Image: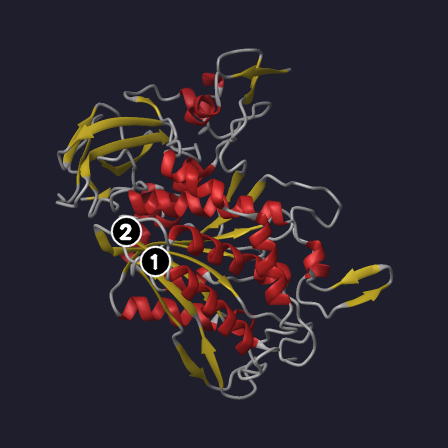
Amino acid sequence: MLSLITLAGAFALLSIAAAAPSPGTTCILRRNTQFAVPNSKEIFSCPAASWPPGPGSLLVPQAPDAELQQILSEIDPKRIQAIIEKLVSFGTRATLSSQTDPKRGIGAARDWIASQMREFAATSDGRMTVTVPGYIQGLAERITFPVLISNVVATLKGETDPSRVYVVSGHYDSRASDPNDFTSDAPGADDDASGVAVSMELARILARHRPAATMVFMAVAGEEQGLYGSNFSAQTYKNASVNVEGMFTNHIIGSSTGDNGTKDANTIRLFAQGSPTTESLARASTRATIGGDSDSPTRELARFVAGVSINQYTEMDVEVIYRQDRYLRGGDHTPFLNAGYAAARFTEPREIYAHQHNDVRFENGTQYGDLPEFCDFDFISRVGKVNAAAMWSLAQAPGIPRNVTMDVSGLTNKSSFKWLPSNETGLVGYELLWRPTSAPFWTHVIPVGSSNSFTVDLSKDNVVFGIRAVGTNGYKSPAVFPFPA
């Protein structure tokens, strides 16, 4: 029989929320202060949390500092609503719709987004620039004539590490039932004016702040026709050897109500790919052999997001889904993954398919179409807070450690690690994280100091290790999984 244990506070709970469930036991990361464990035993009765015993302290998630709390408090559901309703007012934003009509079509939407982003940039003291890069896409399955694909990109240059980049994106194109129908109304409120609204609201607020690393806020086109705009951006960054250390797409984040009528207004899903498809065959084989498939850069990014954004300031839980995307669907994070970047997708907890990719109509008692009336603007604003917490925490932390390796030259119950030294501004040292192999989140932390090597009396056979960087400001990077030297 389960009994309920109430911990002293949310962060105390989060520090132990790392173990995989066993029958009759709940061991999951949550922002509330209650945890279910069997027979009133202490929380470490959860088997995956209590074995093996090892050094270090329990991992305590990073609480938002005063500046981040202020950022989160400024995200405004009324502004979110106004952005979504404005985008819907363009009638259709189909990729093949008019580029020149000032009131209807994708061109009008693009120009309005760009004008708003430029207004935000005007408050940044020159740190934010806005561009509208594009190219002509030739004929393809869903491109019936050559068409201009344009993205709106607002770039907030980092103060101390501008070469390190984090991207948040939504797609501003929409579609009717027929993806090549560019004349019918296609409101696209949830898919994906909601995601664009988050990018724009974060750009508005963060333009007045000074992140250490560079932050990019994008609205991309051509998603419904084949991820064209996102692919253009990802390849542009890759061709320029830009160090994108994290990318998020907000795609269908507008509704907290599912098709069965249930409401979950405090949960957002985060889809995170396992083994990277861009790895060499040799590295992929090594990853499979050592059990590193759940410690890809994207999954470490997702763990980071959960750790910095599940708290009372966002009022959200982040359900990390260990797969690239939903079945039969795709999103704008995929081109970034294909370019070798860590990228993940935010999506509402339970979708209503009658409100996606459908002509607006009332049929057999059901209202079809992606209309603003089905959006929960308070929910979207909370999703925006999750994004803001993640983006700001990433940008303020040091970059991830590089070339992290584990010594496997001999049989030993100790584990030794090395990584490249760094002279990055604001870097104070490193931490070794570990967790049982069956645990989804990191459980323990060991301070390493400023050294770029460390040995711990804990067998690599029994746990998973990661190394993360620590800043003088207290911010910490995502962990990096060590490969055999």
* Residue 175 on image: x %, y %: 63, 71
> In the image, is residue 431 above or below residue 200?
above
Taking depth in this image into account, of 443 and 405 the one nearest to the observer is 443
Q: Farthest top residue?
A: 40
Taking depth in this image into account, of 322 and 85 the one nearest to the observer is 85
User: Can residue 129 be spotted in the picture?
Assistant: yes
Question: Which amino acid, by three-letter code, is at mark 1?
Answer: Tyr
* Residue 275 on image: x %, y %: 39, 52
Task: Say what secondary structure mark 2 lies in.
Answer: strand
How busy is the neighbourhood of tag 1: few (under 14 within 10 Å), some, or many (20 plus)? many
Rendered residue at 38%/75% (across/down): 133
The answer to whether 272 appears left or right of 246 in the picture is right
Question: Which amino acid, by three-letter code, is at mark 2?
Answer: Ala
Rendered residue at 44%/62% (across/down): 334
Q: CA distance from mark 2 to mark 1?
A: 16 Å
Q: What's the mark number on residue 341?
A: 1
> In the image, is residue 38 above or below residue 292?
above
How busy is the neighbourhood of tag 2: few (under 14 within 10 Å), some, or many (20 plus)? many
> In the image, is residue 306 above or below residue 206?
above
* Residue 34 on image: x %, y %: 56, 21
Task: Say what secondary structure mark 1 lies in.
Answer: loop
Taking depth in this image into account, of 415 and 298 the one nearest to the observer is 298
Rendered residue at 73%/60% (across/down): 354
Q: Which residue is mark 2?
A: 213
Toward which corner of the image does residue 39 lie, by quadrant? top right
